[in-house]
Image (cartoon, rainbow, N blue to C red):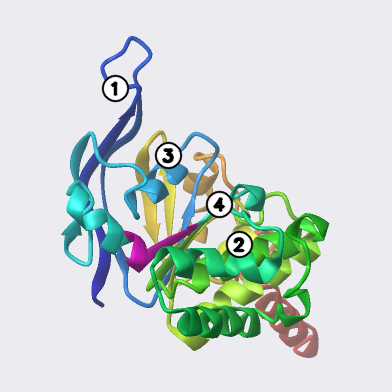
Amino acid sequence: MRKLIETIDLTYHYRSGTKDEVKALDSVSMNVFQGEILAVTGQNGSGKSTLARHFNALLTPSRGEVFVKGLSTSEKNNVKEIRKIVGMVFQNPDNQLVSSIVEEDIAFGPENLGLPQAEIIERVDWALRTLNLESLRREAPHNLSEGQKQQVAIAGVLAMKPECIVLDEPTAHLDPRGRREVLENVLRLNREEGITIVFLTHFMNEVIHCDRMLVMENGSIKMQGPPVEIFRKSSELKNTGLDIPVASRIAEGLLREGFKIRADIIHTEELIDCLCQLKSST
């Protein structure tokens, strides 16, 4: 797979050079591959948000390097191009909504790219259509639900047509329905539009839909690999303050009780299928 983002020995200090200096990232080397969905997980303070902010040069390394399609984020002349490639969606959508009408908000990014008006209109229409938000076109963002606001924030980034979208815990403050809707749209952007997704979350039931996951702790990567492999190491994962998905926990308990069930179950549907097979064989 082709590297889209690469970090090499990335170290970052907040308040560098002061008595309050804090090392947030410690020699992090990792890749984001084109076309994948990468989950970055970890407890609050693990460094995942700091890492994500390096992907589009909101932060630059105290030591080490970050490259986006071969462009160093430390070179100021590269920043504009890097931010065309990598878009950011933050946890609180109110921090990204700047206009009084939804369609104007979505147009804000393309306008800043200096695109012709006809193309801006086309991109806004496409983003609304892609995320099934056409009915909200003329709504005021402050009248929307938190889930709808987050969808509009994603649409605003999508209208800039980045190759990669980084979502920093976009479902943290949403109810289950809002989380499901955001996740479904993010998965669809990857599947249908080929957009690379970096998804920061602490919800393990969201991680199961990703191709790969990184587990961070104290500014370092503790585990990485496909979710099914990471969740087999439940004890190691729990040491970082995280847990395995509900379906995996149930399967793990059944295995301990001597039931013949697969050890690699992470989806609820897989668990139901296995339980049905157990029942039919008894």
Residue 42 drawn above or below residue 178: above
Could you tell me how far apart the alpha carbons at marks 3 and 1 are, in whole angstroms? 16 Å
The residue under label 2 is 153
Instruction: Give the label on residue 47, or none.
Output: 3
- Residue 128's quadrant in the figure? bottom right
- The amino acid sitting under disc 3 is Gly
Q: Amino acid at mark 4?
A: Phe
Q: Nearer the viewer, mark 2 or mark 4?
A: 2
Distance between mark 3 and mark 2 Cα atoms: 23 Å
Instruction: Magenta stretch: give its range.
Output: 83-88
Name which of mark 3 and mark 2 comes first in the sequence: 3
**Residue 42: x, y in percent?**
50, 45
The x, y position of residue 27, in whole percent, is: 24, 39
Which comes sooner in the sequence, label 1 or label 2?
A: 1
Tell me what residue is drawn at x 24 percent, y 42 percent.
Answer: 10
Residues marked 1 and 2 touching at CB (< 8 Å): no
